[in-house]
Image (tube, helix red, strand yellow):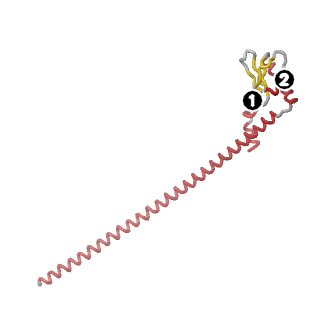
């Protein structure tokens, strides 16, 4: 074998080794690419699943938030209706005719006389002329109210509050459920 042939043989074997190394490299690259594609597909599927779950959760939260806000608005409207009704009732009480007030005050005076005996009687300025105080009851002064009377024992230890505002508050608090159910039930 001549030196030329030996060099050629070495070059040929080198070329074959180079081609084999390239084929092996390409095969490894293809395997790595296939693994990366598979991993990307798995990650994409996992992210899509997570995104859908997050989207569903966000939708549920938005729906719950909207329902809560709707309930708040409804309750606020109902509360306003009840407050308006209460104001109308108080306004109606304030507009009681003088004769009706006089009869009511006569009953209240008798009740207070039975409970307290001698006492002071307070009323608003416009109702003073309607009062006919029995013996043992004295005028205590004026109070700021739409109507009604306040009685105070002579030793000032006991007060009976029969102002229209107080009586309405008492009736209202005892019957709130019934009032609510009649209007909104």
Where the N terminus falls, by quadrant? Answer: bottom left
Which residue extends farthest front? 125
Q: Give how far apart the Cα atoms at labels 1 and 2 are.
A: 19 Å
The residue depicted at 81 percent of the width and 19 percent of the height is 113
Q: Nearer the viewer, mark 1 or mark 2?
A: 2
The residue depicted at 38 percent of the width and 65 percent of the height is 36
The part of the image, by quadrant, that contains residue 42 is bottom left
Which residue extends farthest right? 99
Identify whether 122 is placed above or below 81: above
Q: In the displayed structure, does residue 31 sit left or right of residue 106?
A: left
Q: Which residue is mark 1?
A: 166
Q: Regarding mark 1 in the picture, which secondary structure is present there?
A: helix
Estimate the x, y position of residue 178 in percent, counting from the top left.
75, 38
Estimate the x, y position of residue 137 in percent, counting from the top left.
81, 17
The part of the image, by quadrant, that contains residue 8 is bottom left
Estimate the x, y position of residue 107 in percent, counting from the top left.
84, 24
Chain-order first, disc 1 or disc 2: 2
Q: Which residue is mark 2?
A: 131
The part of the image, by quadrant, that contains residue 111 is top right
The residue depicted at 65 percent of the width and 49 percent of the height is 70
Where the C terminus falls, by quadrant? Answer: top right
Label 1 Cα crowd, 10 Å radius (few <14 / some 14-19 / many 20+): some
Identify whether 182 is placed above or below 5: above
Q: In the image, which disc is placed on residue 111?
A: none
Estimate the x, y position of residue 147 in percent, counting from the top left.
79, 29
């Amino acid at each position: 074998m001549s030196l030329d042939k030996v060099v050629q043989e070495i070059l040929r074997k080198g070329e074959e080794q180079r081609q084999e190394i390239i084929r092996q490299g390409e095969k490894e690259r293809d395997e790595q690419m296939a693994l990366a594609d598979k991993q990307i597909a798995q990650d994409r599927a996992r992210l899509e699943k997570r995104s859908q779950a997050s989207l569903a959760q966000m939708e549920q939260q938005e729906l719950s938030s909207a329902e809560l806000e709707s309930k708040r608005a409804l309750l606020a409207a109902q509360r306003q209706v009840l407050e308006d009704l209460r104001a109308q009732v108080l306004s109606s009480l304030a507009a009681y005719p003088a004769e009706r007030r006089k009869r009511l005050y006569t009953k209240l005076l008798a009740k207070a006389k039975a409970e307290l005996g001698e006492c002071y009687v307070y009323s608003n300025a416009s109702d003073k002329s309607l009062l006919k105080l029995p013996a043992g009851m004295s005028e205590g002064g004026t109070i700021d109210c739409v109507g009604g009377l306040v009685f105070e024992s002579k030793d000032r230890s006991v007060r009976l509050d029969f102002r229209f505002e107080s009586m309405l508050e008492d009736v209202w608090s005892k019957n709130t459920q019934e009032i609510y159910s009649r209007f909104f039930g």
